[in-house]
Amino acid sequence: MLDQAIKDQLRPHFAELAGAVTLALYRSDHAKQDELREMLADVATCGDKLAFTEVAETVTGVQFDLLRDGEPTGIRFRGVPGGHEFTTLVVAILNAGGKGRMPDESVQRRVRALKGPVRLRTYVSLSCTNCPDVVQALNQMALIHADFHHEMIDGELAEADIETLGIQGVPAVVHNNGIVHVGRANFAELLETLEGALGRDTSGDAAAQPPKEYDVVVLGGGPAGSSAAIYSARKGLKTALVAQRMGGQVQETVGIENLISVPYTEGRHLAADLEKHLRTYTIELLDNRKAEQLVDLGKQKEVRLQGGEVLRASSLILATGARWRELGVPGEKEYLGRGVAFCPHCDGPFYKGKRVAVIGGGNSGVEAGIDLAGICAHVTLIEFAEQLRADEVLVRNMKNLPNTTIVTNARTTEVVGNGQTVTALRYMDRASEKTEEVALDGVFVQIGLVPNSALAKELVATNRMGEILIDERCRTNKPGIYAAGDVSSVPFKQIVIAMGEGAKAALTAFEDRIRS
């Protein structure tokens, strides 16, 4: 089943396994059983420490477990891990065999503190680009925690579960038959969600440990934060970079064609390149972490992280970027993953042949409308302003589609549902102030970004949009605190600008340091 070229690529990686990994297939008469058996048998030929076996227990679907040195790892796949999930299988094998990059000890300590037993199921689509990140993170947690079991489930093979649970978006993480998470997430976000849902033993927190001392602490692992950390390290400063995920918002960008000297790249590739560059310097990368509090101690700035770690430095560079803006209307949060979505690429296939709305008339909204029109019965695009704000070529393309309706000068007021799923969208015509209702099955929110500045608002000055106010050298109104990139008031939110602003912030911090 596996192409010979793929086998050749896998062999050098699996040759480095430190422990024995077994792919244990359950017996089944399912139509995909032979396909899965052939895949696993082929994978097992790619390494001396890999084995394939069939266990006596019979199941109704298709499933297999990963064993490490003959013992369960807590990782199970229910489905054929093809498409994007094949990478997940490869990563799981490497991690179970003691290879691949795992979270550092401070993060692992938080995982082990989760109150067990932990029993999670993640429903995925094999075409979803966000699903592997969630599944891989939860698989790593299963390898860390002694009482953690995680199953990846192909939603296409679990239609009854999908209907019973009311799942309309992936990845959907289920605990005790309740959905605890839907959509894109990184390791840190998932860990925070599980800590809230399951509780944690705080006795192992790092609160009693002394603060870690640095010259510069950078918050944010995107283009601005990466640039700031690299420039700080090049000046010989002891530097730490704190990030929930390396790459930041770049991870959500598919095609990038305006990074000067790079005709084309993709967000994930650029994020990986940023991390690779960072790791060539003596920068302490504290990823999978979330800052909980910032304290100005005068000459020293203190960063308190979730889990109890405390960092101190004379210079603090805020490069925390921005996030998707939410509507903030009734029904939006209640139906997230059950009719409300933010990613048309991942969740669009769930609405094939159905009626949907896209909120937002900028480039992202109109592009989403065009994409969804190719698979949905009808797309209604709703824009608050009197005219669409997207590029003219996009507007013209959408207007030429036969199954789209464009509504401008309208304010979305409510996402309507029946308790299980979205059934309609209400909006107010801003000219007549009349409320209208559109019957539909899904709502895709595409209304731009909001700066991630909440943590710093009590510490530094911000404008009405929440952007951190900076001068021409990236200084905030507090000595020793700087800001760069999309979280700041710098005009134009572009990757190339964020990189330059990160470098500028680091150079300013260094200049201020030597002058003081």
Image (cartoon, grey):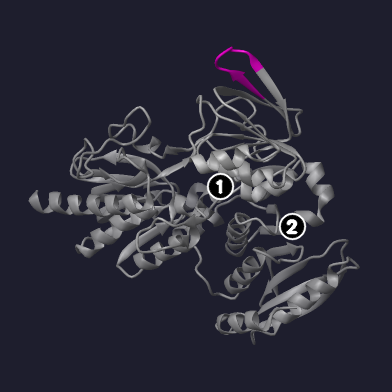
Sequence-wise, which precedes: disc 1 or disc 2? 2
Secondary-structure class at tag 2? strand
Tally the numbered discs.
2
What residue does disc 2 label? 153
In this view, the residue in front, 204 or 393, is 393
Q: Quadrant of residue 442?
A: top right
Q: Residue at x 50, y 47 (%)?
A: 202
Label 1 amino acid?
Arg
Going by the image, does 64 lie left or right of 322? right
Pinpoint residue 199: horizontal percent, then vertical percent. 58, 44
19 in relation to 352, above or below: below
Q: Which residues are magenta?
A: 426-435
> Against 132, is 366 above or below?
above
Mark 1 highlights which residue? 200
- Position of residue 245 measured from the top left corner of the image (x, y, whole percent): 46, 54
The answer to which quarter of the image holds residue 18 is bottom right
Is residue 146 shown in magenta?
no
- Please tell me how crowded label 2 is: few (under 14), some (14-19), or many (20+) other residues with Cα within 10 Å: many
Q: Residue 22: tell me if it is visible.
A: yes
* Numbered circle sitting on residue 359: none
Tell me the mark number nearer the camera, choosing from 1 and 2: 2
Question: Label 1, label 2: how many angstroms apart (C-alpha)?
Answer: 26 Å
Q: Residue furthest left?
A: 515
Q: Residue at x 60, y 40 (%)?
A: 398
